[in-house]
Image (cartoon, rainbow, N blue to C red):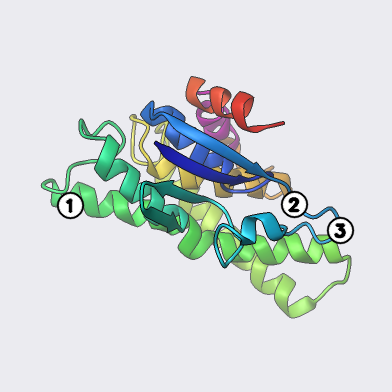
Amino acid sequence: MIILHHLRIGRSMFMVWQLEELAVEYELKVYHRDPASFRAQDDLKAVHPLGKSPVIEDGDLMLSESSAITTYLLEKFDTEHRLAPPRSDLQNWARFTQWLHYPEGSVFTPLLFNMLLTRSGQPHEAIELFSNNEIKLHLDNIARQLGDSDFILGESFSAADFGISYVVSLAKRLGQIDTYPSLNEYLDRTLSRPAYLRAIERAVE
């Protein structure tokens, strides 16, 4: 059975959602952030030396990094290719892989800078200028890719939508998508899926 080490308030919520979409039996171990630092506490560091989440265990395998976990779960459980194209369809698989890695690889960092500046209450002109420009660049890119489609790769939901939904939802919490009606509508669609609602019910205490 898959064990998911889930740190409350963060990206691993979207891994719970993925397991629900895949209809995989799993055990959820929930960890709470330090109220002062808002970082993981020693109990999660005892699981993985980075003290970060998500982390899964599957037998003797312990795996971190969201995209790596997603790829592993798809290879093992998505045998009918409901959430990703088969590797034999090389161009569509490559396009899917690009959008699977894009949220963590490119979009998250400027959003993190923005979040840290907001929490600190201490302006930093150079970092703020960089993060604002990068956030706009990436939100424009996501909105352009989405176009009139329901999901990031077209009319069908895919595993690429987990990460895209995460960064768009983070951007929304930071007040960055008010001028992007298509991104608000996209979040309404993805975060109203039954599997996401089940994930919220199970993982939010």
- Type of residue at label 1? Gln
Measure how far apart labels 1 and 3 are at the Cα level.
47 Å
User: Can I make out residue 179 in this image?
Assistant: no
Q: Residues within 10 Å of mark 1 (few under 14, many from 20)?
A: few
Residue 21 picture location, percent across and down: 41, 29
- Where, by quadrant of the figure, is residue 108 drawn? bottom right
Residues shaded magenta: 184-193
N-term mark: 1 or 2: 2
Question: Which of pointers 1 and 3 indicates the residue nearer the eye?
Answer: 3
Residue extending farthest to the left is 88
Q: Is residue 12 part of the magenta span, yes or no?
A: no
* The N terminus - image quarter: top left
**Residue 40 % position (x, y):** 70, 57
Q: Residue drawn at (45%, 33%), measured in percent from left and top?
A: 26
- Residue at the disc numbered 1: 91
State the residue lying farthest toward the top.
194
Query: In the rendered structure, which amino acid carries the disc numbered 3?
Result: Ala
